[in-house]
Amino acid sequence: MTKKVPSSELENRMGRFRKRMYQSNPDWEIAVIFSKINLYYFTGTMQDGMLIIPKNGDATFWVRRSYERALEESLFPSIAPMNSFRDAAGSIGKAGTADNAGNAGNGSKLPDAVYLETEVVPLALYQRFQKHFPFKAVKPVDPQIAAVRAVKSEYELSLLRESGRIHRHVLEDLVPDMLREGMSEADLSTELFSVLVKEGHHGACRFGMFDTEMILGNVCFGESSIYPCYFNGPGGKRGMSPAVPLLGSRDRKLRKGDLVFVDVGCGVEGYHTDKTTTYMFGFSLPQYAIDLHNKCVAIQNEAASMLKPGAIPSEIYSTIMNGLDEEFLQNFMGFGKQKVKFLGHGVGLLIDETPVIAGGFDEPLEEGMVFALEPKRGIENVGMVGIENTFVVTKEGGECITGDNPGLIPVY
């Protein structure tokens, strides 16, 4: 049975988006959304098409494929079929937008600018769109959508909490029994993926970072977790090969004394949590590595206590960073030159959402925002220690929804 996003949820999202547009761009006239993630957010279905949102008038979701599935899955009030952009351009004059001659169907002038997702709409797609919607200028709508999506409703939080429950159970309770000497990183990755899906994971890990592929996350043994990679995170991985730097290496086998680093996403009905758990296989890590790990856990807990409405992300970041000594900072949030300049990031329909706990993010936090905090520290010849959990912003501070195990779980 298809689980539909409630009508009230869709109405609330559209209302908040319009309010945000009025506040940030009071002269806006029309926004058009193409990306499937944002289409799902506003319509409750992930079909190929475009959502046209006029300032005055009702929004319409024009669907190329599959119109029938959109009708079956979505409670959005206005869904229409189209074979090409011409169909939409010639039929939406009542909303005050253009026909294929560049004039509004009701005789009014075509708006000068259209607000688009400039972070994700390819130039070729825009050029095809512009043939039938000849706007003179394009302005970004990405910040407004991101701000609306950043504050989760109770409906969304319920899905995130369910994802967090699965995440905690699998990584803290089940993974230790999956580890066996001689297995490869690829073995653990594929077995872990299967278990997560059986437990309720929706089977994908979605990122907004341009041209980024991800099946599960980082599953690494020992020094593999500090191997350089293109992904913008503190951990690394070798992956299957230079052509597919994903999953894990077939060649790196688990040995006694290895640090096992598991940084993977989980999700339910589109909504993700992010979690990193570490394990000591065979026997304990050196005490200095354990001490560095414990410091990362303390940093997570300190940052989580600051996740309250009104707090400023950049100030949380500077407070934490300014309290760390130079020696610890050398390989904090990465290893060597492969370091990142954040402590955490928003999570939701994408694993890498905004706001970010980093410099430059100066808008106050709001109750219902969700963050993954991930303080980590690379150690030569050992790997990446540290932790990551997902937290909801509350008046009492961050509410962890992915478990409270500090990591370095012994598997002897």
Image (tube, rainbow, N blue to C red):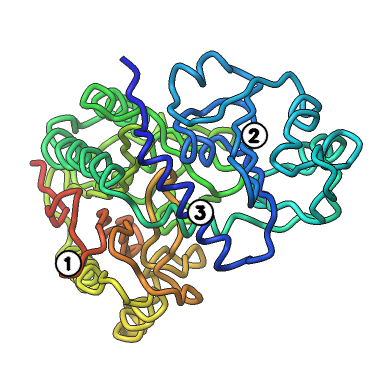
110, above or below 268, in the image: below
Is residue 288 something that shows in the picture? no
Is residue 47 something that shows in the picture? yes
Q: Nearer the viewer, mark 3 or mark 1?
A: 3
Mark 2 residue element: strand
Residue, x 77% and y 55% (percent of image)? 113
Total numbered labels placed on residues in the image? 3
> Is 64 in front, or is 14?
14
Instruction: Give neighbour class at mark 3: few <14, some 14-19, many 20+ (Cα, 10 Å).
Output: many
> Residue 17 bears which disc, if any?
3
Sequence-wise first label, 3 or 1: 3
Residue, x 46% and y 70% (percent of image)? 341
Amino acid at circle 1: Asn
> Is 6 in front, or is 95?
95
> Residue 294 bears which disc, if any?
1
The quarter in which the C terminus is drawn is top left
Q: Where is residue 367 in the image (x, y as percent from the top left)?
A: 28, 64
156, above or below 203, in the image: below
Q: Are marks 3 and 1 in contact (CB under 8 Å)?
A: no
Residue picked out by circle 2: 50
Instruction: Give neighbour class at mark 1: few <14, some 14-19, many 20+ (Cα, 10 Å).
Output: some
Amino acid at circle 2: Met
Amino acid at circle 3: Phe
